[in-house]
Image (spheres, grey):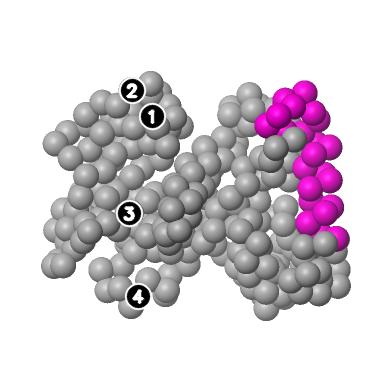
Amino acid sequence: MPRLYGDPSFPQSAFYSAYLRTYLERDVRAIVNVSDEKKFLSFIRNTAARTAQILNIRKLAEDTDITRTTAERWLSILTSANLVFLLRPFHVNISKREVKAPKLYFIDTGLAAFLTGWDTPRVLRTGAMGGAIFETFIIAEIIKSYLNKGLQAPLYYYRDKEQREIDILIWKNGRLHPLEIKMTANPSKKHITAFKALDNLPAPYERGEGGIICCYNEIISLGEMDKAIPFQYL
C-alpha cells in the first residue's frame, strides 16, 4: 500500500474505499461474473468480520442471504485474489487434513479494519476484534515470509476433542513447531499449555521447538523448548 505508507496523513477511509471499489469493478469481473455487487460487498464484510475464526460456510451464507454454493464460489474468489487464506487443520493421519473446517484469515488487516468499522489503531487494539486482527497480522507475516522465498507455507492449526487449540503448527524437516499468538505483554507458560497435546505424537511426527508470539519486548525462555517471541521479530 505505497500511498498509505508514503503519506501517513492520507485518509485511510478514502484509500480503502477506492481500493475496494477498484477491486469490485475491475478485478472481480476479471475473475468471474458477480451479478449482485451489493451482496458481494456484504459477503466481503461478513468474511472480514470472521477473520481468525473457524470457517462456518453455512452461517456465512445465511448472514449474507445467499446460497451455500454461492458462498463457496465467492470465497474461492477471495482466496484466488489472496484476500483470504484458509489455514487447514492438522491431523496425525495426513489424509484427514481436508476433512475438518479450516480457519479463515482475511489477510489485509487494514482492509479488514475498514470493512468492520474500526477507525483508528488505538480503538481497534482495545476493541472486540483486537485479538483477531493481531492474530491475522501474525499469520499474514508468516505466510509472506514463505511466499517471498517462492515457497508454500507449511502451516496448520490444531484442535482436538478436548478443545485444546494451537494457533499454528509449522511443519519443518519432520518436526511440528507449535506457535501461540497472544496480544499480551506478559507471556507465561499458561499460554502454551495446549502444546502438551503434541507430547506423544506417533512416528514419523516429532514435536519441535515452539513459542508464543506476543507483545513482549525481548525473547525469553518459557521452558526447555519454548520461548516468548516479540512480534517485531517477524
Amino acid bearing label 3: Ile
Residue 54 visible (yes or no): no
Which of disc 2 and disc 1 is earlier in sequence?
A: 2
List x then y, in percent, for residue 54: 50, 58
The C terminus is located in which quarter? top left
List x then y, in percent, for residue 13: 80, 36
The N terminus is located in which quarter? top right
Residues tagged 1 and 2 counted as in contact (Cβ below 8 A): yes
Q: Which residue is mark 3?
A: 170
Mark 1 packing: few (<14 Cα in 10 Å), some, or many (20+)? some
Mark 2 packing: few (<14 Cα in 10 Å), some, or many (20+)? few
Amino acid bearing label 4: Lys
Secondary structure of the residue carrying numbered label 4: helix
Image side of residue 170 versus residue 53, left or right: left
Q: Which residue is mark 4?
A: 96
Q: Residue at x 26, y 43 (%)?
A: 210
List x then y, in percent, for residue 148: 48, 51
Q: Which residue is mark 2?
A: 218
